[in-house]
DNA sequence: TCCAGATGTATCGAGTTGATACATCGACAA
DNA sequence: TTGTCGATGTATCAACTCGATACATCTGGA
């Protein structure tokens, strides 16, 4: 149960917390929410549902949808959180460790910020920022080291990649600013967390560190 | 040999065309060139090398590196393109079909634009642009359709995703402009393909179409 | 001299993908 | 009525990929 399931699991629990659903719809909603970032196939969805049922975090109810003819019964399994599942979800939503600011997990966690408390939101955003800043440093170094030996297109590709990460950091800056503002001056849930126009020098933000794993 | 190997294969051939290399270095170079976009593990590299050898596109030479002690011999297998391999590579580099402008393949193709002729470069860039434009349309639609039912964070995530794709399109616009300019007015290989400051309305650019596969 | 860390080849289990099978439902036309 | 088409729905499989790791040698520095 390694790998992507660390993403899938919270996503499923999070969606089911909003309302019970069956597999097909779960898939649609997930691809809607995370669509631009990642896809979800049945091959991972159904095994994951199965395993969640086994661990008693969700339970499936065979529900028969009323068709227009009387005799036919169309099986669809509607899943919902159990008490244990709700508790587990709360635990997951409260976590803000290094794992939460990795590429694979961050998006999902962010998508469910609505169910996450302000403290945790801020910690995750700041952790993510640190993570990206580290990557930036790595990229910049290998960029400087090899700029001579590269042809123009490889160079352009790297420049473009660098820019994307830089932009991502600025996006986070805006969100962090907004979270801080929310907490200090406004009643919760007001302003939209749009990236601010002033990038705001927040280089002091540097919680826990993860070490960059071989990327050059 | 489906999936990522469609990426790996051309990448390996492209690198080996520049100079013979052994596995470890191939991996380093690949992660250097494509580092910000994707990673490469041994678990995929070595099987791919093996399969390339079997198809006679590359051949590995057991080379013993002179160590400072006399007795020890350190095995390292240096791979290089065969004549068949070179031919195949040329064929791959000349292709510009729908597959080349998908997410998984585009970066690699772009990284080897230096070995690709101007016509093909332009076709790939334009195809990629069309591809992204289609995706933009899909995202915008599901965005408009569901904007009411979403909480602010999910919305922000989608807005951010949309923006990234939009930016990608503008990047391509700059590159396309540059390619056209190169071909028309400048001797080949001069100007840097930096994204132009004027996005340049090139909406007429619309070669062949691929249909979007379920994303809502 | 010895050790930690880089270099180097190689494999494995666990998990994921994309395709596909199978079946029902709703709508629309002949 | 019947036929067919595309969406809805659950489920599985072979092929493939990842991350970790094993094993060994080389290099630089304390």
Image (cartoon, coloured by chain):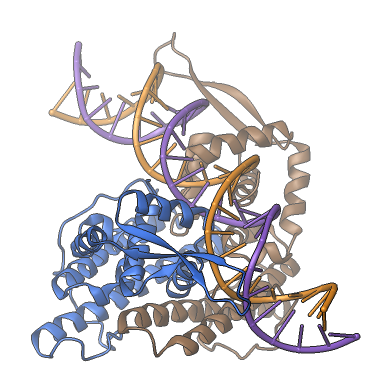
Chain colours: A blue, B brown, C purple, D orange
- Above or below, A194 against B42 in this view is below
- Most foreground residue, B203 or C15: C15
Q: Is residue C30 left or right of residue B29?
A: right
In depth, the one of A58 and B186 nearer the eye is: A58
Task: Give the image location of residue C15, x and y in percent.
Answer: 43, 47
Where residue A105 sits, quadrant-wise, is bottom left
In the foreground, B91 or B5: B5
In terms of depth relative to the viewer, which is nearer, A101 or B129?
A: A101
Q: Residue at point 47% right, 85% down?
A: B143
Name the image quarter holding the C terminus of chain B: bottom right
Whether residue A140 is visible to the viewer of this picture, yes or no, is no
Side (left or right) of A10 relative to A163:
left
Q: How many marks?
A: 0
Q: Residue furthest left?
A: A184
Vertical placement of A43 versus A82: above or below?
above
Q: Quadrant of the N terminus of chain B?
A: top right
| Residue placed furthest toward the front | A71
Q: Identify the residue at image location x=27%, y=89%.
A: A192
Residue A74 seen in the figure: yes
Q: Position of residue B215 (x, y in %)?
A: 55, 72
- Residue drawn at 31 percent across, 77 percent down: A171
Q: Name the side, left or right, on which A19 lies relative to D8.
A: left
Q: Is residue B9 above or below residue A162?
A: above
User: What percent of the width, then of the height, locates residue B92?
Assistant: 73, 53
- Classify B163 as above or below A5: below
Residue A2: x, y in percent?
Answer: 37, 46
Q: Residue furthest top?
A: B71
């Amino acid at each position: 149960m390694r790998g992507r399931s660390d993403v899938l699991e919270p996503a499923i629990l999070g969606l089911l917390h909003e309302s019970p659903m069956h597999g097909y719809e779960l898939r649609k909603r997930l691809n809607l929410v995370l669509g631009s970032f990642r896809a979800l196939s049945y091959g991972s969805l159904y095994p994951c549902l199965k395993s969640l049922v086994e661990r008693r975090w969700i339970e499936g109810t065979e529900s028969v949808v009323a068709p227009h003819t009387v005799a036919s019964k169309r099986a669809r399994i509607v899943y919902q959180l159990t008490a244990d599942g709700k508790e587990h979800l709360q635990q997951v939503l409260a976590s803000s460790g290094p794992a939460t600011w990795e590429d694979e997990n961050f998006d999902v966690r962010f998508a469910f910020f609505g169910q996450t408390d302000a403290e945790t939101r801020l910690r995750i955003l700041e952790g993510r920022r640190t993570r990206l800043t580290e990557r930036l440093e790595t990229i910049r170094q290998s960029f400087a080291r090899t700029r001579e030996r590269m042809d123009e297109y490889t160079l352009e590709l790297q420049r473009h990649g660098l820019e994307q990460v830089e932009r991502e950091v600025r996006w986070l800056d805006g969100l962090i600013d907004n979270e801080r503002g929310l907490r200090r001056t406004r009643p919760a849930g007001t302003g939209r967390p749009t990236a601010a126009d002033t990038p705001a020098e927040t280089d002091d933000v540097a919680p826990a560190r993860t070490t960059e794993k071989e990327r050059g």
